[in-house]
Amino acid sequence: MHYHRRPGWALPESAVTPESVFLNRRQILAGMGMGAGLLAAPGALRAMPQAESAFDPMPDLHEAFADAGMPPTDEALTSTYNNFYEFGSSKRIFEEAQKLETDGWTIRITGEVEEEMEISVEDLLTEMPMEERIVRLRCVEAWSMVVPWIGFPMSALIEKARPLSSAQYVKMQTFMNPDVATEQRASWWPWPYTEGLTMDEAKNELSFMVVGAYGKVLHKQFGAPIRLHTPWKYGFKSIKSIDHIEFTSERPLSFWEELAEKEYGFWANVNPEVAHPRWSQAEELVLGTEEKIPTQLYNGYGEWVADMYAGLPEEVGERFWR
Ligand SMILES: Nc1nc2c(c(=O)[nH]1)N[C@H]1C(S)=C(S)[C@@H](COP(=O)(O)O)O[C@H]1N2
Ligand SMILES: [Mo]
């Protein structure tokens, strides 16, 4: 049975209540360009066992689901409550975001690599090992949600990019198109949205490139056609609609760090004990519920990521967590 191989960081699949999420999975793959003919491609094949498992009855997992305590958040909620400042600074940007044209999207890969390249998302969909992950996202604003993402490990993309040994960081940037994303006309923001990870972080198995959600091609408001999700870090690290990845030997300056470095630092590891300068991080409101739950160190994913931070110098201090 599939769930014996389920990695520990994944929430039990039975936690996904809407059956449509599972039942539609064949259609998703088709919609993503992995239609019947392409299902023979290696990437698609690797995705299939996951997809098949969706039809397994797994009643005993309902108990584990109760332990996890957080069922996937309603799609109707998560797809209408978004942070995507390119389209406005409110949470209601989902209509504006539909203007983003994602067909033919490519990502430029530059910097400390054997050879710079430009790859299409379409190619990634057939080449990369696709999987579904049901994981938490904790926003620095103290709300959280659980989303069933579809995507592939960032490590697979890094392998394809062939960085040089001099590369120490991965810098990622969102598209720049003020004609469509009207907030990009406002000059007080340091556009384009930029984020970064150390190479270790980027290669960690939890760093995930997202191309779908809830059994569908990624919603534009979620950062179509491709966004990052690093579940142990505050949500702002999970950059949307990426069109440029640069491998660099220098630590990149993130969008929010440039705006307010004391509030939104480079590391941004979820930590209930380090308050944001303007509010506590001890608890979070789970979207769709009325109750606050305690926030967990590394958002509960410490077992897979804590080692990466064991050797960091102490003077990095409390900002390490912001
Ligand atoms: N390009 C871009 N990426 C972004 C943001 C943004 O404004 N622009 N907001 C971030 C923040 S603060 C959060 S919490 C998550 C929200 O993701 P969601 O809208 O899919 O829930 O996206 C992150 N990625
Ligand atoms: Mo956020």
Image (spheres, helix red, strand yellow):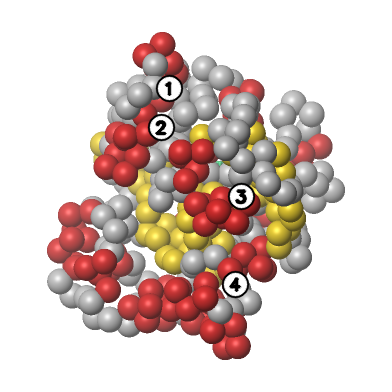
Real-space Cα separation, disc 4 to disc 3, in angstroms: 19 Å
Look at the picture and state if 58 lies above or below 163. below
Question: Which mark's residue is nearer the viewer, 2 or 4?
Answer: 4
Q: Which mark is residue 185?
A: none
- Judged left or right of residue 71, residue 213 is right
Which residue is under mark 3?
162
Q: Is mark 2 on a helix, strand or loop?
A: loop
Look at mark 4 in the image and give the residue it sits on. 126
Asked which secondary structure carries label 4, the reply is helix
Q: Is residue 137 visible?
A: no
Taking the spot 43% from the left edge, 16% from the top edge, the residue there is 316
Instruction: Please name the residue that numbered disc 1 is placed on.
Output: 320
Q: Distance between the residues labelled 1 and 2?
A: 8 Å
Residue 65: percent from the left, percent from the top? 22, 61
Looking at the rendered structure, the kind of residue marked 2 is: Asn
Q: Mark 3 or mark 4, which is nearer the start of the sequence?
A: 4
At a point 72% along the width and 29% down the height, the residue shown is 190
Label 3 crowding class (10 Å Cα cut-off): few <14, some 14-19, many 20+? some
Residue 295 appears at what percent x and percent y?
Answer: 30, 36
Q: Between label 1 and label 4, give the one nearer the viewer.
A: 4
Q: Distance between the residues labelled 3 and 1?
A: 29 Å
Residue linked to disc 2: 269
Question: Where is residue 188, by image quadrant?
Answer: top right
Label 1 neighbour load within 10 Å: few <14, some 14-19, many 20+: some
Q: Which amino acid does label 1 sit on?
A: Phe
Q: Earlier in the sequence, mark 2 or mark 4?
A: 4
